[in-house]
């Protein structure tokens, strides 16, 4: 059994029902919109976000979920999908998970409107059912994701990001959405309990580890997930690079920054930067940091009694770190 199947195993029924409810939550009276949302639903990824919602909810409530849990999972997926559709427009990207992106098939104007529509559907799903506590969790996540992206753009121009700013960027950009999923799961079954904050922190830690793992892919020889050196080509500051820059001579630092800024299309130069980062211990350091986030996440889970849902979440934590793409 593949690891993702194993993780899904204790929530198979919930995930099937969720897919039905999620599809319904997208429906509209406009035929064009339905055609596009149908296209989106049929090209879904691993569905990690709803899995986090259901697993945390079931771990906290002895295996029980309710309508609020389904709504929380649908809202987060609607809003996440909206941000992806908008991202593809911003990045002028024609592919998403191996398929054509919405903007590639229907052009930018329609893609932006579809993103707006999905966002409003998500908000209304919460408001119509009085799930204001869930809506707050999600709204904070959307605000933080936007701030994280903007912070990265602001800082990336100068290439002098400190490790602390890097953590702040990835906390907002990547970790905040996984944190919201786990907080939603907890809040849907145990509103106003300490579980919500605990699970939010758990999701945040996993999200941090997830992003560092993504950074490390950039330095792997076999281009899995994404091609080697793409972050350098895009002048993105990743943890291995930040560590290397903070632990080298002035001359080396100048050479690296000049390479990333002005020679990022030169394959030979990019390779040299990758070698430099490896030799400076950047990868080892990033791996150690990733392991720390994982340990902290597992410590939070250790406080909960044993259950198939807890086991699946432990698997999820390990999967995030051991995945191959």
Image (spheres, rainbow, N blue to C red):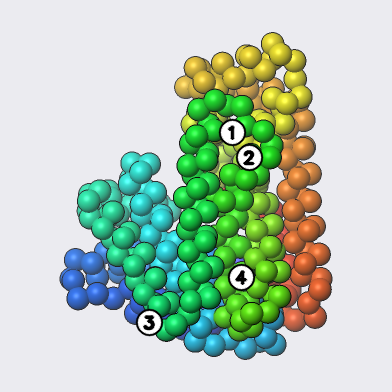
According to the image, label 4 marks what residue? 183
Percent position of residue 186, x then y = 63, 76
Dot 4: within a 10 Å radius of its alpha carbon, few (fewer than 14), some, or many (20 or more) residues? many
Q: Is residue 287 left or right of residue 131?
A: right
State the mark number for residue 299: none
| Nearer to us: label 4 or label 3 | 3
Task: Give the mark, 4 or 2, whose residue is nearer the N terminus.
Answer: 2
The relative height of residue 216 versus residue 265 in the rendered view (above or below) is below
Q: Disc 1 and disc 2: Cα gap in Å?
A: 8 Å
Task: Give the mark, 3 or 1, whose residue is nearer the N terminus.
Answer: 3
What's the residue at 18%, 71% (across, down)? 30
| Nearer to us: label 1 or label 2 | 2
According to the image, label 2 marks what residue? 166
What's the residue at 52%, 40% (across, down)? 151
What's the residue at 48%, 42% (across, down)? 150
Q: Secondary structure at mark 2?
A: helix
**Is the residue under label 4 in contact with that under label 1 (CB below 8 Å)?**
no
State the mark number for residue 237: 1
Q: Disc 3 and disc 2: Cα gap in Å?
A: 38 Å
């Amino acid at each position: 059994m593949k690891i993702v199947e194993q993780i899904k195993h204790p929530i198979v029924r919930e995930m099937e029902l969720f897919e039905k409810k999620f599809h319904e939550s997208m429906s509209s009276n406009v035929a064009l919109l339905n055609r596009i949302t149908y296209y989106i639903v049929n090209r879904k990824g691993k569905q990690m976000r709803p899995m986090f919602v259901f697993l945390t909810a079931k771990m906290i409530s002895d295996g029980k979920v309710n309508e609020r849990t389904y709504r929380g999972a649908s809202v987060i997926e609607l809003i996440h999908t909206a941000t992806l559709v908008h991202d593809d427009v911003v990045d002028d990207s024609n592919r998403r998970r191996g398929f054509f992106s919405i903007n590639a098939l229907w052009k930018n104007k329609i893609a932006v409107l579809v993103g707006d529509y999905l966002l409003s559907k998500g908000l209304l799903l919460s408001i119509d059912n009085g799930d204001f506590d869930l809506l707050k969790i999600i709204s904070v996540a959307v605000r933080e994701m936007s701030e994280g992206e903007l912070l990265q753009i602001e800082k990336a121009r100068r290439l002098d990001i400190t490790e602390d700013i890097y953590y702040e960027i990835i906390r907002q950009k990547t970790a905040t959405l996984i944190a919201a999923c786990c907080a939603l799961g907890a809040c849907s079954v145990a509103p106003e309990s300490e579980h919500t904050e605990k699970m939010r922190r758990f999701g945040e830690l996993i999200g941090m580890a997830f992003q560092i793992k993504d950074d490390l892919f950039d330095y792997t020889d076999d281009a899995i997930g994404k091609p080697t050196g793409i972050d350098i080509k895009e002048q993105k500051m990743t943890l291995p690079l930040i560590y290397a820059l903070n632990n080298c001579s002035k001359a080396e630092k100048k050479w690296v920054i000049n390479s990333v800024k002005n020679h990022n299309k030169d394959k030979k130069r990019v390779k040299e930067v990758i070698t430099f980062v490896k030799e400076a211990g950047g990868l080892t350091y990033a791996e150690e940091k990733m392991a720390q986030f994982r340990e902290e996440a597992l410590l939070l889970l250790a406080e909960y009694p044993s259950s198939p849902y807890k086991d699946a979440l432990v698997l999820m934590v390990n999967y995030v770190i051991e995945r191959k793409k």
